[in-house]
């Protein structure tokens, strides 16, 4: 399966993940609001003999994406802000995936119009080793398979897991969590 992967954030982790995706044969679009980061990334790809699209807006990055992976800070407000942008601008088919070690996918997915197309990864996405693919209650099998295709294409072992974290947003807590 050929995937177009939009990577949001060209810092060290985002750039490393984009390189891995390009080397694995995926079509990659790398976005960052900082032109210097994009120039640095462009130089890295030129040294590797690979070309990717470098863009400065989320809208340009996600326009044709099958999967969007964000590398914004792992805090709820930052993730919600970028997911809101991606959700509004990406085509309906696009899967949203985020690396996070402590946030609830249930919270993030509930703030989108595509909760079935949301996933989370635990582990070093830009490095090596096995990864945990987190699904929320509404995550579709198509989304899981899409993410696994991407991660296996990078040579990574993947284990599936339901969202282990309690939601932090009140609307996602059931009555027993409020007592």
Image: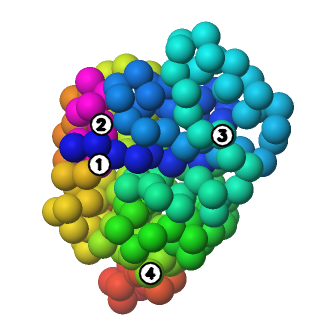
Q: Nearer the viewer, mark 3 or mark 2?
A: 3
Q: Nearer the viewer, residue 84 or 64?
A: 64
| Direction top: furthest residue | 47
> Up-down: is 152 above or below 102?
above
Residue 141 percent coordinates (x, y): 16, 63
The residue under the point 59% across, 53% down is 61
The residue under the point 43% across, 39% down is 27
The 10 Å Cα crowd at callout 4, few under 14, some 14 to 19, many 20 or more, is few
Is residue 154 a member of the stretch shown in magenta?
Answer: yes
Residue 21 percent coordinates (x, y): 42, 31
Considering the numbered disc 2 on the image, is that residue within a helix, a strand or a loop? helix
User: Is tag 1's residue or tag 4's residue first in the polypeptide sequence?
Assistant: 4
Residue 166, visible in the rendered structure: no
User: What separation in Å lies between label 3 and label 2 (alpha carbons)?
Assistant: 22 Å
Considering the numbered disc 1 on the image, is that residue within a helix, a strand or a loop? helix
- Dot label at residue 147: 1
The 10 Å Cα crowd at callout 2, few under 14, some 14 to 19, many 20 or more, is many
Q: Are marks 2 and 1 in contact (CB under 8 Å)?
A: yes
Which residue is label 4 attached to?
113
The residue under the point 57% across, 71% down is 89
> Up-down: is 149 above or below 143?
above
Q: Main secondary structure of the magenta part?
A: helix
Q: Which residues are magenta?
A: 147-155
């Amino acid at each position: 399966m050929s995937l177009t992967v939009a990577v949001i954030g060209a810092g060290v982790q985002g750039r490393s993940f984009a390189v891995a995706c390009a080397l694995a044969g995926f079509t990659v679009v790398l976005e960052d609001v900082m032109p210097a980061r994009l120039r640095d990334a462009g130089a890295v790809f030129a040294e590797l003999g690979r070309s990717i699209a470098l863009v400065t807006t989320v809208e340009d990055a996600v326009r044709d994406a099958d999967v969007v992976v964000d590398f914004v800070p792992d805090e709820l407000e930052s993730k919600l802000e970028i997911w809101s942008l991606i959700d509004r601008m990406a085509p309906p088919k696009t899967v949203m995936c985020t690396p996070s070690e402590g946030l609830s996918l249930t919270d993030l997915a509930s703030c989108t119009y595509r909760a079935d197309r949301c996933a989370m990864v635990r582990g070093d996405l830009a490095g090596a080793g096995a990864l945990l693919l987190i699904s929320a209650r509404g995550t579709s099998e198509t989304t899981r398979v899409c993410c696994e295709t991407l991660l296996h294409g990078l040579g990574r072992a993947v284990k599936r897991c339901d969202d282990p974290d309690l939601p932090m947003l009140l609307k996602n807590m059931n009555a027993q969590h409020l007592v």
